Image (spheres, helix red, strand yellow):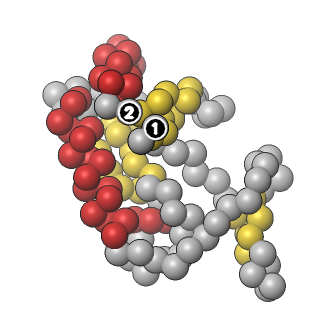
Amino acid sequence: MNWIFKEAFSVAISDSGTVSMDAKMKGIVRVVPYDPRWKNEFLKIKAMIVDCAGDLVNSVDHVGSTAVDGLASKPIIDIDVVIDSDDIFPAVKDRLSKIGFEHEGNLGVEGREAFKRTF
């Protein structure tokens, strides 16, 4: 089972520099130049996840646009956390909620669970 900490979605940038989301999304997406601090922020978040639930997870991976060196991105750290079984998900969810991660459900994608930071 994979789950993420923020929903990924596609964006389009017009010739004038206007950024828009796909038709299903509402709001505005901000795309910024690459920031090398994203790697360190991921490592801090990964350490938090491993410290609280490392015995239950297989891997914690930096994914998405902020994981690509030099790529302009929306400034949201996307993280995949992989577990062996749906059976342990409630325990992982409970532990992560205690350190400030709010469960958002599967956001319409079966087999995925999304979380967002509340801090």
- Tell me the distance, in whole angstroms, between the alpha carbons under discs 1 and 2: 5 Å
Q: Find out whether the residues at labels 1 and 2 contact each other: C-beta distance under 8 Å.
A: yes
Q: Residues within 10 Å of mark 2 (few under 14, many from 20)?
A: few
Could you tell me which secondary element the residue under label 1 belongs to? loop
Residue 59 visible in the shown view: no
The residue that disc 2 covers is 100
Can you say which quadrant of the picture contains the C terminus?
top left
Please, which residue is most extreme toward the front here? Answer: 119
- Mark 1 = which residue? 118
Give percent across and percent down for residue 36: 35, 75
**Residue depicted at 41% across the width and 33% down the height:** 101
Give the residue type at disc 1. Answer: Thr
Q: Residues within 10 Å of mark 1 (few under 14, many from 20)?
A: few
The picture places residue 24, in percent across and down from the top left corner, at: 80, 47
Q: Give the total of numbered labels.
A: 2
| Residue depicted at 78% across the width and 75% down the height | 18
Q: Earlier in the sequence, mark 1 or mark 2?
A: 2
Image-based side of 113 in relation to 45, left or right: right
In this rendering, position of residue 12 left or right of residue 37? right
Question: Secondary structure under badge 2?
Answer: loop
- The residue shown at (32%, 56%) is 42
Can the viewer see residue 80 in this picture?
Answer: yes
Q: Nearer the viewer, residue 83 or 19?
A: 19
Q: What kind of residue is marked 2? A: Gly
> Which residue corresponds to the image point at 73% horizontal and 59% vertical from the top-left?
28
Specify the quadrant of the image occupied by residue 108.
top right
